[in-house]
Amino acid sequence: MSEEEKSVPLSSLPLGDLSKLHEQSKSKSEFLATAMMQFRDIRSKFGMSLNALNNLESKMDQNISLIPLTTNLYVPGKLKDPSRVIVSIGTGYYAEMSVEQAKKFVNKRISFLTKQLDELAEANFQALMVAKAAQQTIESKAKAMQTAK
């Protein structure tokens, strides 16, 4: 364990440092909670993509689809090759894939996001525990100071 990783008992910290630690931990937790919401939204969008691919696969013989112009406006369209789709692979890049390849790609993204969400949840839990411990130590020190008077 390096010197930076050594743990210090919270009771040995002055009130000012405890207060800073409490605020930093709360801020970190809020940041992580926001990141988790964003990751859940992204994962949900990939889930919708997977549903769309499954629907496309089940209706491949029809070659007809509704093309969104806006979120509430669609036009009917005929698919040239329903077995191939164009997938956004990130940062403005797109790739043509078979429906099966696209499903594998989307499933990989969902798995990756789920793993990241689990890690964020653990980090958030740790930040909340540090904030709670700091708050409890602040309260016990304040109580001890009042009793000493």
Image: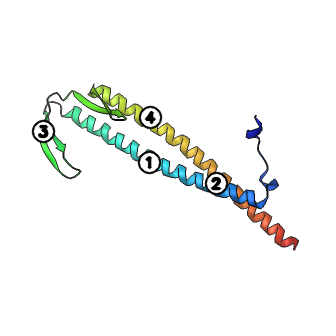
Residue 129 percent coordinates (x, y): 66, 52
Vertical placement of residue 86 versus 34, above or below:
above
**Residue type at numbered disc 4:** Ser
Residue where numbered disc 1 is placed: 38
**Which element is circle 2 on?**
helix
Q: Which residue is mark 2?
A: 24
Mark sitting on residue 77: 3
* Tag 3: amino acid: Gly
The image's colour scheme reads: rainbow
Comes first in the chain, label 3 or label 1: 1
Mark 4 or 2, nearer chain start: 2
Q: Quadrant of residue 144?
A: bottom right
In the rendered structure, which disc, 3 or 2, sits on the residue that comes first in sequence? 2
Residues at marks 4 and 2 touching, judged by CB atoms closer than 8 Å: no
Instruction: Quarter of the image for the C terminus: give it.
Output: bottom right
How far, Cα to Cα, is label 3 from label 4?
32 Å
Seen from the viewer's position, the closer of residues 5 and 121 is 5
Give the label, 4 or 2, closer to the camera: 2
What percent of the width, then of the height, locates residue 57? 23, 32
Image quadrant in which you'd find residue 147: bottom right
Q: Position of residue 71 (x, y in %)?
A: 23, 51
Q: Which residue is mark 4?
A: 111
Give the distance between the C-alpha atoms of the residues marked 4 and 2, in whole angstroms. 30 Å
> Could you tell me if residue 79 is visible in this image?
yes
Q: Secondary structure at mark 1?
A: helix
